[in-house]
Amino acid sequence: MEILGIDVGGSGIKGAIVNTKKGKLMTKRHRIHTPKPATPPAMIKTIEAIINHFDWQGPVGCGFPAAVKNEIVKTASNIDNSWIGVNASEQIENKTGCPTHLVNDVDAAGCAEVTFGAGKNRYGTIFMAAFGTGIGTAIFHNQHLVPNTELGHIPLHNMAAEDYAANSIRKKHDLTWEEWGGRVNEYLQLIEALFWPDAIIIGGGVSKKFSDFKPYIHLDTDVLPAKNRNHAGIIGAALAATSKLKT
């Protein structure tokens, strides 16, 4: 089964056609910068451009940087507040004619990892943290997702954790891998103390650089980079759509 997976991020919107049986991209990834401001009309126009790039007319799975319930956007930490309350799937369908399923972006990436990647055949509690513009999170227990966790916003040093340890903060303040790795370690130690996970998976584009900051991560929990790297969100969005959309 092939589905177009789209991963909406704070800095870029990426898409590719995915074989959901194998968890593989069937095309090259196509990326467009996330518009600023990230309003519904501007972002939906960009998502439409991704769909048109692939000349796609089938089902679409869309990972979105927000809590999502019944296709409706509930939060807006790294997108415009006007998204709150919007049925994004309906708007994408109206624009493109493609049946669309919306899911939290890191929930999508986590689904890809527990099905095809670093979390495959692992049971107990798996925590995924994607470090990008913010910090997105996903929790699985015995391969079952607890949806819409927003644990990048837990307090750390009197601020939201993502304002202290997101990859965007590393870039903004030109932190060394040691400096930033120490911040990531503080965040993950807090997660470890709160949830006692059996494994932690590091996602987002920075997962490609895991070896650069791994020496500064000191936890009792196994910490692993996402095997699907920054393709995980695309694969997982397509995978999530298979259970919701008839093809």
Image: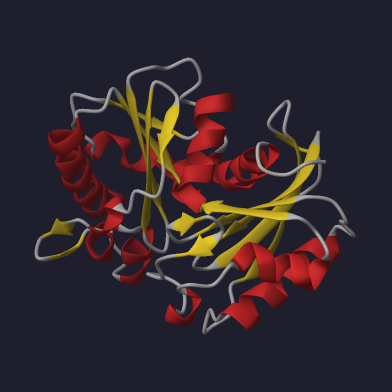
Where, by quadrant of the figure, is residue 188 drawn?
top left
196 w.r.t. 134: above or below:
above
94 w.r.t. 130: above or below:
below
What is the quadrant of the N terminus in the image? top right
**56 on left or right of 63:** right
Residue 218 spot, x, y in % from top left: 18, 32
**175 on left or right of 88:** left
Residue at image location 37% in from the left, 61% down from the top: 134
Residue 174 spot, x, y in % from top left: 32, 66
Residue at image location 78% in from the left, 48% down from the top: 28
Where, by quadrant of the figure, is residue 14 drawn?
bottom right
The front one of 173 and 103 is: 103
Residue 21 spot, x, y in % from top left: 73, 26
48 w.r.t. 57: above or below:
below
Residue at image location 79% in from the left, 62% down from the top: 51
Describe the colour scheme in one phrase: secondary structure
Residue at image location 64% in from the left, 41% down from the top: 235
The front one of 196 and 71 is: 71
Can the viewer see residue 172 in this picture? yes
Instruction: Name the residue furthest front.
Output: 70
Can the viewer see residue 117 in this picture? no
The front one of 69 and 201 is: 69
What is the quadrant of the C terminus in the image? top right
Instruction: Name the residue furthest left.
Output: 158
